Image (tube, rainbow, N blue to C red):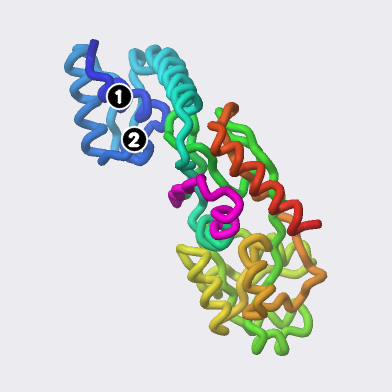
Amino acid sequence: MPPLNALRAFEAAARHQSFAKAADELGVTPAAVSHQVKALEAWLGSSLFVRHPQGLHLTEAGRAALPAFSTAFDAMGLAVQELRISAPRPQVSIAALPSIAQLWLAPRLPALRAAHPALRPSIHALEEAPDFRREPFDLAIFLTRHAPAGSRAFKLCDDVIFPVCAPALAGLLKTPVDLSSQLLLWDTTWTGDWSLWFEAAGLKSPSIESGSEFSLYSMALQAAIDGAGVLMGHEALVSRALSAGSLVAPFPERRVPTGLSLSILAPDRPPAQAAQMIDWLLAQSAASQG
């Protein structure tokens, strides 16, 4: 048998059609993935990929082999999940979008510790929801339309957007038309937020180049609190700032659903400690909305 790491590298690279994306999934460098694939090709005596400047393309041999390898690694992932279920431990490994981890989850951790002192949440910021069949997470919290393959979703709340700003700016915003004189703020993850909101308001959206973009939503949020401009707020992420009065919603009646939901994602059979946390988060969310 060729080395298991070489087989994993091939399967991930073939599935993503990219050494870089495979490296992100496996937690190694693209060079390491390329090296493992070359070693597998040398063992096989045949190429599995055609390398182009634009990316990778599977050869006929690679296309033929991929489905069986994907099935095998999915089965191995499920077996690992069974091991995690059968060996309970206090740590709960959670993946979350950075903004959700910082602005939604972190403020709830003290109450979680008070309710379940034995649980030990371990939080990891990711830009994309993990594949529980391949990555060692117990649950994840993301804005989603549906549960990704290999997981099920527990809806916490709908994702609703509306402009928010510092109280000092709110007096200058009588109608949505007044936003044309303000610097608009947004996060790179949701570049279409302002267009969606303006369309719902029946107004022409300003050019995206006329605003200010942030790679982290928390940075955009702080800029809005400091009075730098008007942020398109996601309700779940700005609710604490609204409650504290550091931000206000100048047009509270103009709330627009994005079609996404803030959801907990979990394997089909989450470990007992993760199930405890899911139940607690769902109960907290229901109480806050009720």
Question: Front-most of 75 and 68?
Answer: 75
Q: Is residue 223 above or below residue 3?
A: below
Q: Is residue 40 above or below residue 278?
A: above
Q: Which image quadrant is residue 221 in?
A: bottom right
Which residue is located at x 57 percent, y 48 percent? 116
Considering the numbered disc 1 on the image, is that residue within a helix, a strand or a loop? strand
Q: Is residue 74 left or right of residue 182?
A: left
Inspect the magenta stretch and tell me whether residue 113 lies in it.
yes
Considering the numbered disc 2 on the image, is that residue within a helix, a strand or a loop? helix
Which residue is located at x 50 percent, y 37 percent? 138
Instruction: Pick out the residue farthest to the top.
Output: 1
Marks 2 and 1 in Cβ contact (< 8 Å): no
Quarter of the image with the N terminus in it: top left
Question: Front-most of 218 and 46?
Answer: 218
Q: Residues within 10 Å of mark 1 (few under 14, many from 20)?
A: many
Q: State the extent of the magenta-drawn residues as a range.
A: 109-125
- Identify the mark at residue 110; answer none if there is no mark: none
**How far across and down, in percent of the image, does residue 107 sit?**
56, 62
C-alpha distance separating marks 2 and 1: 19 Å
Tell me the amino acid under the disc marked 1.
Answer: Phe
Q: Is residue 280 above or below residue 252?
A: above
Which residue is located at x 26 percent, y 32 percent? 33
Q: Earlier in the sequence, mark 2 or mark 1?
A: 2
Question: Front-most of 181 and 85?
Answer: 85
Q: Nearer the viewer, mark 2 or mark 1?
A: 2
Q: Which residue is mark 1?
A: 49
Q: Which residue is mark 2?
A: 26
